Structure formats: C-alpha cells, structure tokens
Image (cartoon, rainbow, N blue to C red):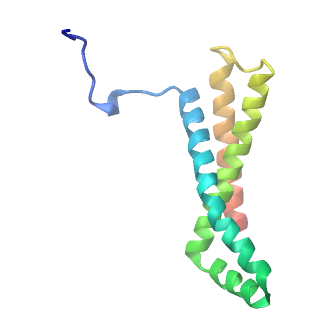
Amino acid sequence: MKNNRPVNLDLTTIRMPVTAIASITHRVTGVGLFVAVGFLLWALSTSLESAEGFRQVQGVMSHWFAKFITWGIVSFVVYHLIAGIKHLFMDAGYFETKETGPVASKVVLVLSAIGIVLVGVWVW
C-alpha cells in the first residue's frame, strides 16, 4: 500500500490550541503529583518518627533545593486543582463550546500563574 500523504516532521510549525495546552498541562501535573507523593510520604514518615526525625526534615527543608521542590509540588497542586474545577464545570455541561472552551482554558492558565507566583512568595 503506497502512502503519499505529506508528513510534517518540523514540530515547531505545529500550533497547539489553548485547550490542548491546558489539558496536557493538567495531565502532566497529575503525573508530577503522583511522583511527588514519594517525597511527601518520606517527609511525613520521618518527621513523625521522633523529635530527631522532625529536626532532620526541618534541616532538609531549609535547603534552597528542597524549597524549590516544595514550590514545584505546591504549584502542581494549584494548577491541578484549578484545572480540575474547570473539568467539574465541563462535566456539568458548561464551557464545552468552541467559544467558551478556550476562554475557560485561558482563565485556568491565568489563575494558575497568579496562584503559582503567590505560592512561590509563600515558600521562599
């Protein structure tokens, strides 16, 4: 079977719609949260073992890299929460048209960016 369809291998020419960007980012933050659960469980388990374990977690969390990781995890939570609320509205029948879908996705991206900046100020 001969396939004469054109093939676009230059991925920089593909323009993703804002709804796709919001959806893909929601999935990525979900995977990030799943991975982050390991770090969070370690910190919780160690801090609850003893007073020494609590001091150890405090020492680790005072390092700039741990603060960066914490900011990333909380940023994942912020985005995933806001996008999840949008999905709940979509399940109820809102923001599903071609006109309202992109607007809702832009609102999610803007609110998330504001929330992530505020979380960054809080963590640092």
**Residue that appears at 64% across and 53% down:** 33
Q: In the displayed structure, does residue 3 sit left or right of residue 97?
A: left
Depth check, front residue: 100 or 80: 80
The spot of residue 41 in percent (x, y) is 70, 67
Q: Is residue 119 above or below residue 67?
A: above
Is residue 14 found left or right of 78 in the rendered image?
left
In the rendered image, is residue 32 in sight? Answer: yes
On the picture, is 111 further left or further right than 29? right
The percent coordinates of residue 118 (x first, y second) are 71, 57
Q: On screen, 58 above or below 87?
A: below
Residue at image x 27%, y 23%? 8
Q: Residue at x 74, y 72 (%)?
A: 44
Quadrant location of the N terminus? top left
Q: Residue drawn 55% across and 73% down?
A: 65
> Residue 12 at what x, y percent from top left?
33, 33
Q: Depth check: 96 or 37 in front?
A: 37
Residue 23 spot, x, y in % from top left: 59, 33
| Picture quadrant of residue 24 | top right
Residue 124 seen from this side: no
